[in-house]
Structure formats: C-alpha cells, structure tokens
Image: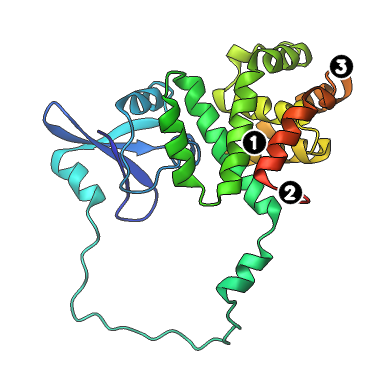
C-alpha cells in the first residue's frame, strides 16, 4: 500500500509504493497533502488506499518522481555526521511553565466542539466517497480521534443528524446554490455545507452565527481559498430564505444536548 513519508530534505512529503516489484515515489502537491493530512488525518508513516493514490494522480495532485534506489533514497533519514561540533543555543529568558491542570482549565468548549466538527467532516467526507463503511469502523474512528466521551457523543450526533436529514439538506442547499449542483461541487465543500446547514437549521441549541462561523473555519482550513466565501454566501442565503425552523428538531437537539452535556458558549 502507498505509505506517506517526509522528504529527507524536509521540503515536503512523498508517497512511496510498490508497483510491479519496483519501488515508486510520488511527489505530492499542496492539494494532495491537504487531502491526506487534513481530510484523512494521516501522518508520516501511515498508509493510504491505492484508490486514494489513483484519485490524486487523476487530479494531477501526485506525480511520479523516482523509482527503485532513488525512491528509497528520498525517504531515508539523513545520516548523522560524525565529529560534528555542537554549538549550544543562546540563553533565553525562561518562561513560566503552565501546569497540565492550568492548560486543561484554559481549554474552552469552543476548542473541543471545533475539534468535533473537524472529525465529523472527515467522516462525512469518507462516507460520501464510500457509503458502505461499516458503522463499527465509524465508531472506531471516533473513539481513536476523540478522547472526551462527551465530545464523541456530540460528534456522533452531527454525523447522524446530517445523514438523517441529508435529502432535505441537499434540497435546501440546492435551492440557494444558483447555477451550482451539489454533485458538481467539490466533495469537501459539499459536506462542509451539509454540516453547517444541519447546525443552522436543525440544532436549536447552536446560534446561527456560531454555525456559520464554524463552517467558514472548516472551509478555510480544509478547502481552497475561495471556498470560505462560497460557503458563507450559501449559508447566509439559507439562513434568510429557508422556511425550516430550528424548532422542528428541538426534541432531537435537546436529547443530544442532554447526552453530550451543556458545553456553554461555542
């Protein structure tokens, strides 16, 4: 399987795989690195599916740059130079150390819920690409990515809610997306819109401003520079033109909020 490696010169990442008995290295463009690390959550040393590599090659995000020994050299760690003179760093002012308890106390609910939305987006993206992913695998992904049980419940609620109302969400987004069909949108943008629209229309405990701002942050981090304006425009139209009251899902939101706990301000 293709494995992600950092280049020996630390200028980026490559994917190394075996094809017909030969080791092949692929250079990754910024879109590929964003896809692998932010969407799929990979890090150096992790393996991806061959289908993901083929997708990136088809889109021009990954290209072959080396084979065999040259491919191996690109991912070998740099040799340590013997008898190297070590120059001590200049002394710097010592900053007061924060204890683990202090950092935990300063961690706001916004940070936790934002992380939950990121994981929800990663799973929605994968489910959009492969709807047959077993529920057990989805749950395993949640547990591995999120250590807080309350945050797992919150994130699972987002995923379940988007899937339950996906047909209606797609219909509403389609109504405000002039000259844009959902199936022609980038997969990541489509799922950011679904997630933002779900929170905007069906989660009475989440202010509309928070729902839109969180969707914009996801677009800025996971998609292109133009996507945040695109997402903002559609969700703003959806907020002002939709006849779907949030109260329609008040019972569902109350149940979810009760299970996840009251996090306070987003």
CA separation in Å, label 2 and label 3: 28 Å
- Can residue 140 be seen at all in this image of the molecule? yes
Q: First in sequence: mark 3 or mark 1?
A: 1
Q: Is residue 81 left or right of residue 92?
A: left
Q: Which residue is mark 2?
A: 262
Q: Nearer the viewer, mark 3 or mark 1?
A: 3
Q: Which residue is mark 3?
A: 243
Q: First in sequence: mark 2 or mark 3?
A: 3
Q: Secondary structure at mark 2?
A: loop
Q: First in sequence: mark 1 or mark 2?
A: 1
Q: Nearer the viewer, residue 174 or 56?
A: 174
Image spot of residue 107 (x, y percent): 65, 61
Q: Is residue 258 left or right of residue 146?
A: right
Q: Is residue 157 left or right of residue 134?
A: right
Q: Nearer the viewer, mark 1 or mark 2?
A: 2
Q: Residue at x 75, y 35 (%)?
A: 254
């Amino acid at each position: 399987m293709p494995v992600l490696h950092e280049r020996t010169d630390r200028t980026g990442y490559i994917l190394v795989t075996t094809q017909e008995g030969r080791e092949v290295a692929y250079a990754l463009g910024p879109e590929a690195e964003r896809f692998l690390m932010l969407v799929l959550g990979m890090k150096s040393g992790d393996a991806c599916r061959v289908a993901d590599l083929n997708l990136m090659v088809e889109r021009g995000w990954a290209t072959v740059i080396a084979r065999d020994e040259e491919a191996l050299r690109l991912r070998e760690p740099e040799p340590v130079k013997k008898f190297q003179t070590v120059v001590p760093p200049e002394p710097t002012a010592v900053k007061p150390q924060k204890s683990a308890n202090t950092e935990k106390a300063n961690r706001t609910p916004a940070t936790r819920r934002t992380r939950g939305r990121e994981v929800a987006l990663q799973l929605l993206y994968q489910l959009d690409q492969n709807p047959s992913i077993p529920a057990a695998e989805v749950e395993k992904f949640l547990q591995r990515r999120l250590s807080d049980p309350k945050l797992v419940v919150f994130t699972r609620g987002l995923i379940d809610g988007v899937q339950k109302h996906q047909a209606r969400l797609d219909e509403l987004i389609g109504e405000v997306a002039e000259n844009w069909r959902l199936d022609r949108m980038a997969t990541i943008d489509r799922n950011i819109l679904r997630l933002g629209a779900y929170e905007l229309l069906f989660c009475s405990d989440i202010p509309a401003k928070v729902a839109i701002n969180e969707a914009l942050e996801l677009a800025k981090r996971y998609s292109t520079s133009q996507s945040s304006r695109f997402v903002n425009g559609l969700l703003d139209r959806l907020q002002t033109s939709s006849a779907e009251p949030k109260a329609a899902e008040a019972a569902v939101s109350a149940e979810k909020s009760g299970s996840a706990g009251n996090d306070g301000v987003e």
